[in-house]
Image (cartoon, grey):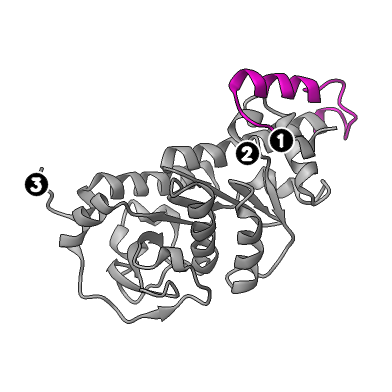
Amino acid sequence: MNVEKITDLKVVQDYIRMCNDGWEQGWHERNGGNLTYRLTADELEACRPFFTAPGPWNAIGVQGENLAGEYFLTTGSGKYFRNVILDPAHSIGIVEINDKGDSWRIVWGLEGGARPTSEFPTHFMNHSVRLEATGGRCRVIYHAHTPHLIALTYVLPLTAKAFSRALWQSATECAVVFPEGVGIVPWLVPGGADIARATAGIMDQFSAVVWSHHGLFASGADFDETFGLMHTVEKAAQIYILAMSAAGGGPLRQTISDDELRHLAQDFKVTLNEEFLD
């Protein structure tokens, strides 16, 4: 198949579609949110003919030796998700990681002096951790400002157990989609090494991690799985808020019991995190 431009490639089209889907959900006000994808060997070779002369190396601020030599699609710092579909070359790009796993350089896109997302250190460390935790299966890290989940960080205890139980009990599919639960990171200044390390420190246990008063980080093997995880968590948070509001702040008359969650996990052959059950 002859391809005239890099945006004709399926991997780039799928990446752009996910950015636009997130925008249409209302999760990416202004320049909020970011998305990175680790290219497969075949995808890299398909993209390589469109690479430009590489830019200078830039330190990431963290190190992931298991990602040395990898290539990532990434959104740009200060760029708007709503513009990705309209102007991909200025909104997104591909970066190469050096042989030490501690620096990046642009090989395509991010035109006009743009740089990878300011959250690239967090994405990078999450990729490193999830690569090990999933045996290389994980390729996508997605951060969005999901409003109902953010609202929950003001009213629920900031613990993995409190959030996991609330979400599991709000929508039946949740215990199947993320049986390990969700992790919680307390509020930290975004964009630096501290929040990157705090997130990566629990990303080996969870495919989704809540940033208090900020949003959600989700990971997955492909775009559908990762977007689906983000969507499921946010919808469950919305249901919880609607139910609590309808009940005047609670208590709720009924919910999914712990034994029902166990039965659900057994039927769907997933391992539920028993630490979060009573």
Which residue type does callout 1 highlight? Leu
User: Dot 3: what SS?
Assistant: loop
171 in relation to 208, above or below = above
113 in relation to 49, above or below = below
Is residue 31 visible in the rendered image? The answer is: no
What is the quadrant of the N terminus in the image? Answer: top left
Residue 145 within the segment the image draws in magenta: no
- The answer to which quarter of the image holds residue 259 is top right
Segment tinted magenta in the rendering: 245-273
Residue at 75% across / 42% down in the picture?
A: 163
Residue nearer the viewer, 39 or 238 = 39
Q: Give the image location of residue 146, x and y in percent.
A: 61, 47
Q: Mark 1–mark 2 contact, CB under 8 Å?
A: yes
Q: Which label is found at residue 233?
A: 2
- The answer to which quarter of the image holds residue 191 is bottom right
Disc 1: which residue = 167
